[in-house]
Image (tube, helix red, strand yellow):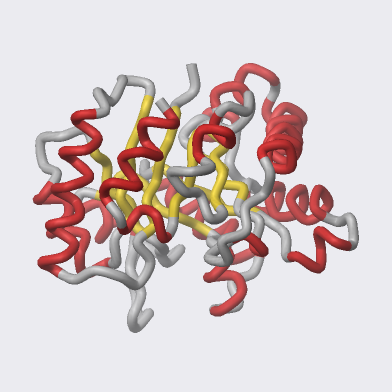
């Protein structure tokens, strides 16, 4: 059975005190939700808050992720973070290729590929993001764009490693806008992603890869989204900053 994954992307929010408080509240909520073995909850705070959050959830089944990483293990890369650094503070997951990184910081498909390979090579789990703009959707290019981004990101990742990867479909037009893909729209793209994984890695491997949805996931729409057969959880933005809302999203997924 593939994992159900609920990841909270805190983006550039929280500090030491608020991060610890939020993490503790989520840990309590996830515990009260009776988190099953097949489900992973991942908190992705800002870099400087990662050790604080890791300490706050120590001993629980809450996992820690980072929002970005450099593809090189060390060197003269001012302001960057390596996989080794993330591993040393308790990270198990890394978001790669989030649309905000692509749009605001000009990350290319090639950059995303290098980062994804670096994360896999460091025995961490990448959450690889793909998704189209509103213009691309209106032009009928959604599947074309997703196919290009997915295949580019996974170049160099082979069958024995693909099961460690998580794919996040995040339509760019839905992120932070309050607009959400309908369950049918999301399922169509998720099913397409899984079909691409089958072509690349075979049916058995494709069925083991978690494909999650990101794009204004809330406690209100989570149940309908997660009821779809190829949606295995969510990459949650704003709602992950509200422990009560995030707990309800976790409950909807499991």
Residue 189, x across and y down, in percent: 73, 41
Quadrant of the snapshot with the C terminus: top left
At x 89%, y 55%, the residue is 140
Residue 99, x across and y down, in percent: 58, 65
- Position of residue 38 relative to residue 252, above or below, is above
Residue at the far right in the pictured view: 139
At x 53%, y 65%, the residue is 176
- Position of residue 100 relative to residue 220, above or below, is below
In the image, 247 versus 68, the foreground residue is 247
In the image, 246 versus 207, the foreground residue is 246
In the image, 27 versus 127, the foreground residue is 27
Quarter occupied by residue 67: bottom left
Describe residue 150's horizontal placement relative to residue 63 as left or right: right
Quarter occupied by residue 208: top right
Residue 22, x across and y down, in percent: 19, 55
In the image, 198 versus 186, the foreground residue is 186
Describe residue 116's horizontal placement relative to residue 59 as left or right: right
């Amino acid at each position: 059975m593939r994992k159900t994954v609920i990841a909270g992307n805190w983006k550039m929010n929280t500090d030491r005190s608020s991060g610890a408080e939020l993490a503790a509240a989520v840990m309590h909520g996830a515990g009260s939700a009776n988190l099953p073995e097949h489900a992973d909850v991942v908190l992705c705070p800002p870099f400087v808050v990662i050790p604080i959050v890791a300490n706050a959830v120590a001993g629980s089944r809450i996992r820690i992720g980072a929002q970005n990483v450099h593809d090189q293990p060390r060197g003269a890369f001012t302001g960057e973070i390596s996989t080794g650094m993330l591993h040393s503070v308790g990270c198990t997951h890394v978001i790669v290729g989030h649309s905000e990184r692509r749009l605001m910081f000009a990350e290319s498909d090639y950059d995303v590929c290098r980062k994804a390979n670096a994360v896999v090579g460091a025995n961490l789990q990448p959450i690889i993001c793909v998704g189209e703009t509103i213009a691309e959707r209106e032009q009928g290019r959604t599947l074309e764009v997703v196919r290009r981004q997915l295949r580019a990101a996974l170049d160099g990742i082979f069958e024995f490693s693909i099961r460690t990867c998580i794919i996040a479909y995040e339509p760019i037009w839905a992120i932070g806008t309050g607009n959400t893909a309908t369950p049918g729209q999301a399922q169509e793209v998720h099913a397409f992603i899984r079909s691409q994984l089958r072509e690349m890695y075979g049916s058995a491997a494709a069925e083991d890869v978690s494909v999650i949805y990101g794009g204004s996931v809330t406690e209100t729409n989570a149940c309908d989204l997660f009821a779809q057969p190829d949606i295995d959880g969510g990459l949650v933005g704003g709602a992950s900053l509200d422990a009560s809302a995030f707990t309800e999203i976790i409950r909807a997924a499991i």
